[in-house]
Amino acid sequence: MVSVVPFVIVAAVTFTVFGKEPTRHELLRGHQIWQLSGDVGAVPLELMQEGLLDVLEHSGTSKKVRVPFQSLEETRRLLQEKGVSHEILVEDLATFLEDGERLSKRSAMERDEYNCSEPRHDSYMTFEEMECFLKRLSENSPRASLTSIGKSCENRDIWMVHLRPDDPRDSEEAVWIEAGIHAREWISSAVALHILKELVQDNGNIGQFDVYVVPMANPDGYEYSRNSDRLWRKNRCKTSNANCAGVDLNRNWNFHYGVGASDIECSEVFRGTEPFSEPETKALRDAMTKVKDQLKMVLSLHSYGQQLLYPWGFSKHEIAPNTEDLIAKGKVFADAAKSAHNKAYKVVNSAGDLYTASGATDDWAKGVLGVKYTYTLELRDEGEFGFILEPSHILPCSEEVWKGLEALLKEIIKE
């Protein structure tokens, strides 16, 4: 039985995307959001691998999905065959997004001129604004250097900030932080930029680490999600299918490549033609490999779900080295993060508690580089707004992540 119910976030949505007319959502015209019910098992993930829908929740039994207009009938038929019913939460995604923008408290004309001195906390930044902030940061801080580690498919820079301790002679270990690898997860890069600001001001309180931060790993996809398709996930490289661009960069790393991913170009989890087929993952791989002997921790920022995930992601049965330490240090992060704004972060295994997926940054860093502490951090929220998280969450989310990271690094430095 199919019924139409109000989407839980409709009444509360006041998010803002500036600078473009509502027609920019035309690519999502006719797309629907469905809530599946009953024992769905692996059905949503299977259909996502086939390119028929997009799973919107990070859980082992994901039940909230986006169905493109061209897949509605086939998806409905397949779900019926498998005994899975659904409710329509959003009849037309383009209209839903346009209505949300009309409800916004601020208009495009009210957007403050940006002076590049610190990250925005009241709106999501453009890629150009991010670049401006990073360049100003590196100019003003003697501890910071800014390097382009490569170019995207559309020739945008992939920027890496290297923060050195006050006395580089004290540094033997390093931390790597990556964000923005999935285009629609805007909060991840916003938080990474605020973490950079805190790290510059830290003055060694977290220990004498070298810190490498790539706050926007997928600039092409990010700008496309801002201007054309708010729920775009992949990069923007061309594929052999002219109608389906992009590769899921978090399925493109060469460690148990292919598990939980798809070889179908139209799938949201298309793995690419081969490991490291994409310029973005090649750039990240090469930069990380150069400092692999220093790396003590790798943290990949994503959204959403408020979960700190530890390897492995490729298997529900194999246990990663140092799992007990990963869990113990993860709980330190979660406890400290909760102290900021009382938001709970669960410490869970990527595959055992969620779904099997390989080719991700954290598994590769653990399995190939041998980094002891590797995590994926799913940021706010738990599903009310999901990927379309209001800018009002930027500052509190950044504050809680900084609290957690500060406590985590202080524990790691004791070893």
Image (cartoon, helix red, strand yellow):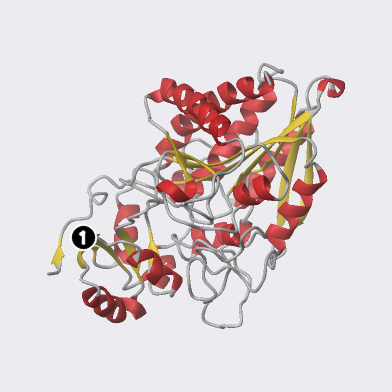
The residue carrying mark 1 is 37
Estimate the x, y position of residue 149 in percent, counting from the top left: 77, 51
Residue name at image x 42 percent, y 62 percent: 21
Q: Is residue 346 left or right of residue 361?
A: left
Estimate the x, y position of residue 246 in percent, counting from the top left: 57, 70
Residue name at image x 24 percent, y 62 percent: 36
Establish if 273 lies above or below 212: below
Residue type at tag 1: Ser
Estimate the x, y position of residue 43 in percent, counting from the top left: 33, 67
Estimate the x, y position of residue 313 in percent, counting from the top left: 52, 51
**Quadrant hosting residue 196:** top right
Determine if residue 151 is in view. no
Q: Is residue 76 left or right of residue 45?
A: left
Establish if 181 lies above or below 173: below
Q: How many numbered marks have been drawn onto this rendered protein structure?
A: 1
Residue name at image x 50 percent, y 48 percent: 186
Indicate the quadrant containing the C terminus: top left, top right, bottom left or bottom right.
top right
Q: Is residue 124 left or right of residue 287?
A: left
Label 1 crowd (10 A; few <14 / some 14-19 / many >=20): some
